[in-house]
Each structure stands twice: as structure tokens, then as C-alpha cells.
Amino acid sequence: MVLPGASVSAAGETVDVRLIAFNDLHGNLDPPTGSSGRVTLPDGSTVDAGGAAYLATHVDRLRAEARNSVVLSAGDNIGASPVKSALFHDEPTIGLLNEIGVRASVVGNHEFDEGYAELRRIQSGGCHPADGCQFREPYDGADFPYLGANVTFDDGRPALLPFRLERVGGTPIGIIGVTLEDLPAMVTPEAVEGLEFGDEVEAIDRTADVLDRFGVKAQVVLLHQGDGTEGGGPDDCRVKPGPASEIAAHASPKVDVVFTGHSHQQYNCVVNDPAGNPRTVLQGASFGRLLSVADLTIDRQSRDVVRARTRARNEVVTRDVPPDPDAQRLIDEAAAKAGPIANRPVGTIAADLVRQAAPSGESPLGDVIADAQLEATAAGGAQVAITNPGGIRTDLVHASSPAGEGDGVVTYGEAYAVQPFGNVMQTMTLTGAQLKAVLEQQWQPGATRVLQVSATLRYTYSASAPVGSKVSGITVAGQPVDPNAPYRVAVNNFLAGGGDGFTEFTRGTDITGGPVDLDALIGYLGAHPAVAPPPADRITATP
């Protein structure tokens, strides 16, 4: 994609710079599987993509093609990771990013999964305070800074660096990092205790002005916030109006390119800045399947980007290239050290259990996980279990396992990849009216998040009804819900704390603890051989 308009400087008066970015890697060292490992092309066909060793190969090629290049990340490098990375607190993934030469990353919400102190350790190095150095000793930390211009302590002091300055081809480039303002709703409260997350546009504008005063005119934003799409290929711009587009349209015109993340979508857009000048806005899906490339031309005299000569694309990380040997050695080391745990069989499935939802929002894997959580909390009196779709990270595929036991075997590593957060189950009492209020909160400004529910809960919703009045016909164990009666509802601690905007859960009473969500799933798989996809009959959608 080439930006329109504006005059063009003579070639001898300019320097070309290639920016190479990715987002939402989530510790996917191995090629991701199922729908998470495919990229949709413009004609609707798909191609297998992703895998850290292939990512490294593609990065090396892209850098070799350009005299001046910078590798960047738009956040969520770690957290919600498969077992090869997660067992070692994502230290292998940071090692990979160091190897491919990442120069800066914005913090995503998942960088805070284990709290601010752990983020600082990931940044600076040192052994984990509880588990020590289990991958490599010593752990030296990230070679790149984590940025967050809108992240402060309660007293207003910066909690993270706001920007990084790169000098490329003799020209300075300012890289600003800004994460989503509503990040606290995405993590447990204790993970961000003592921190504040400010308005994204205000933070970009403030930082852009500082850079400008120091003569840094070429500016790039790493924004961990994104839009949804209506489909299309990697370079289509069929975005639904959302927060990333809104921020890109209002942030300082001093910014020349915006790399986005968080929504795991693919798009390549041009959005006019407040001065009416077009600028590139990109996102590269997730799990290392795409690399977002922006080729910039910078005027040596003005030090600013000549936007008319900006060319941008999302490049597929295909698997038809040789894997990078250094990256592969790191992945093999992680596999060898994690293998005794990751390859242990924990159960069997009769067919793929996918997280892709039916039109109602109900998914086969979501059903199974909710049923597992209900069974694991029945001793605490749970009548219903409800889980958040964002906590389900990948499919359970009916295929040969790494341990070679044959089709249908689920290993610990595969189960871990589905439920990697280590959330703790909690059972609370809600009235029938509160339970309805929870279900109504699935429709929020700018987002619809359909909760996954156990087989004991059924309801109908009308897509066209007003927000707050969409849900009807709620039953528990086949009986209509009484608004005044108490019901015992099992959820993970993320939802119990009001995560994803489900604040009604914070009004629950008589809370009792339960197992870790992963243990609930593993226990269920072990107790029920050959688990099959349940019928999608718990949630009924009407016009």
C-alpha cells in the first residue's frame, strides 16, 4: 500500500528505512495449530503460517533486503503461552526476541499476567523468585525496552519508558509505546495494583511533542489496541470502526505510522491524521503468522517521513522456508526441558474440540471447559459454571500427540495451551436477577463477549433487542430462573474480579475457592474418555 498525496524529495536527499513488526506472539514457539495456524488470503483460501523458527527466517530475509531496518513488537509477546514457553515463565520467548533483534516493544495486557514485578524481571533479568532459573541460568532479561507512555504509578510517576530513540542511516526515529487504557479490565486486579493506565491519545500527543522538541520528526507508534474486521486478506482494510482507528484518527499528526495489536486481526489501512494527512495503520494477526512491514523514506534535511513514499504490507510467515537454525536450537532446548511434563497424556477426545463459535456464540470447546469447571466445583455446591471466551486460547485437535500415543490423545502441553492462565475457580452466590444481569453484560460498547456456559444453564437472546434487555428464557437444570432465588455459580478469579467488564460478578456473596482451571480441565478429560463435541443447544440466538 502506497500513501497518496504530498511532494516527494529527491533520492539523494533521503534515507530509506524498513520497519518490521509483529504483534500478539503469545509465546508461540512451535507453529500454531488449527485455525490459529492459518492466514486467510484475499480469495478466501488459507495458508499455514507461523512458527518462531520460520518467523526468524522471514525477519532475516526482510532485513537483508533493506540497508536500514528496525524490528519492533506491538505487545503480548508473552502470556497465554503454550507450555514450552510458559513452563519457564516465557524466558524462551524473550530469548527468541533477543535473537531476532527486536529493538522495542510496547507492553500488552498479557505482559501483566504475573504482575508488574514479574514484568520488571522479564525486562531486567534474574531468576524467578519462586521457581528459580529453570530454563537457562542466568536469565539475562530482554535486550529491548518495554514501552508504556500511558502507564504510571498511582502518584503519577512513569512506570515504564515512554519511547525509544533509534538512529537509522544517520536519522533519528522516535518509537512511542502506548497500551490500551482499559487494560485493568483484562487482568486480575492484583496484577496492576498501584498502576494507572491513561488515555492513549493524550499519551501519544504528549510524547510526540517531547520528541519533536528534541528534533525527532520521524515518529512511530506501537499501539497495543486494535479493531475488528469483516474479513479479507492480510492487506485488506475491512475494519469495523473501533478503538485503534479512533486513536489513529485523533493522535498527533507528528506520528507517521501506527502498528497495532490486541485484536488478533489482519489489516493494512490508511487513516487521515488530525491535519488531514494520510498515515499507515497496520496489524499482523497473531501468533507470529504475519509480519507487518512499513518501508519509509525520510527527508535528511527535515528529518521527517515523506509519507507519499510510504509502502506497507503484511507478509505471511510461510512454512516453506528453512527454519532459522539458531531459533530452532532454542526451541529444541525448550522442548527437551519441557518434554517430560508437556508430553504426559491426560485424556482423550473423539473429535476436534474447537473454540470457534456457532452463530449464537457457543463453542464446542467452551462447552466442555464450562462442564469441566462445573464438575470440579460441584463439591462447593455449584449449579452453573461460566467461563470467559478470551481464556480459551487454542483448539484441542484430534491428531497424533507429540508423545506418539495416537489420534485423540490429549497431552498436558496441549491442555495447557488451551488454559494457560492458571486462574483459580471460585464459587459464589448470585440471585436470579444478578445472573440475568451477568448475561446482559455480554453486550458492551464496542464489544460482544459471549460467555461459555455449562450444560445446566440455558437461555435465549435477541440480537436486535436493546442492550440490557436481550436475554430471556433462562433456566438452571431445566427450571426457570427465579429472580429472587439464590444460585451457586462457578467462575474463574478473573471473572470474579469483574474482568472483561463483567462487573456484576463482583457482587457475588459466600465465595468459596476451588481448583485451578487447568486442573479442572485435566481432571475432566481424565474422567471422561473420548470426549466428544457437545450439541450447541445451550444458547439460542434469535433476530
Image (cartoon, rainbow, N blue to C red):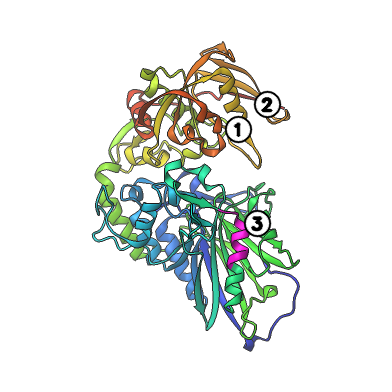
How far across and down, in percent of the image, does residue 197 sit?
Answer: 53, 52
Q: Is residue 204 left or right of residue 323?
A: right
Compared to residue 391, the image places residue 216 above or below, namely below
- Mark 1 vs mark 2: which is more N-terminal? 1
Which residues are the magenta region?
198-207
Viewer-side residue, 424 vs 98: 424
- The rendered magenta stretch, by its main secondary structure, is classed as helix
Q: Which residue is mark 2?
A: 470
Which residue is depicted at the point 30% across and 51% down?
335
Quadrant position of the C terminus in the picture: top right
Q: Which of the marked residues, 2 or 3, is nearer the chain's N terminus?
A: 3
User: What residue does disc 3 label?
Assistant: 247
Q: CA distance from mark 1 to mark 2?
A: 10 Å
Whether residue 353 is situated above or below residue 337 in the rendered picture: above
Q: Judging from the image, what secondary structure is the residue with disc 2 in?
A: loop
Q: Is residue 538 visible?
A: no
Q: Are the residues flagged by discs 2 and 3 in contact, CB closer than 8 Å?
A: no
Horizontal and vertical percent position of residue 453: 51, 26
Give the amino acid at mark 2.
Lys
Total numbered badges shown on the rendered structure: 3
Q: Is residue 149 left or right of residue 513?
A: right
Residue drawn 57% across the image and 54% down it:
198
Q: Decide whether residue 266 is among the magenta residues.
A: no
* Residue with the mark numbered 1: 442
Q: Is residue 326 above or below residue 225?
A: below
Work out whether mark 1 precedes mark 3 in sequence or the reverse, and give the earlier one: 3
Q: Residue at x 60, y 65 (%)?
A: 206
Was residue 202 drawn as part of the magenta stretch in this picture? yes
Kindly indicate whether the residue at mark 2 contacts the one at mark 1 (C-beta within 8 angstroms).
yes
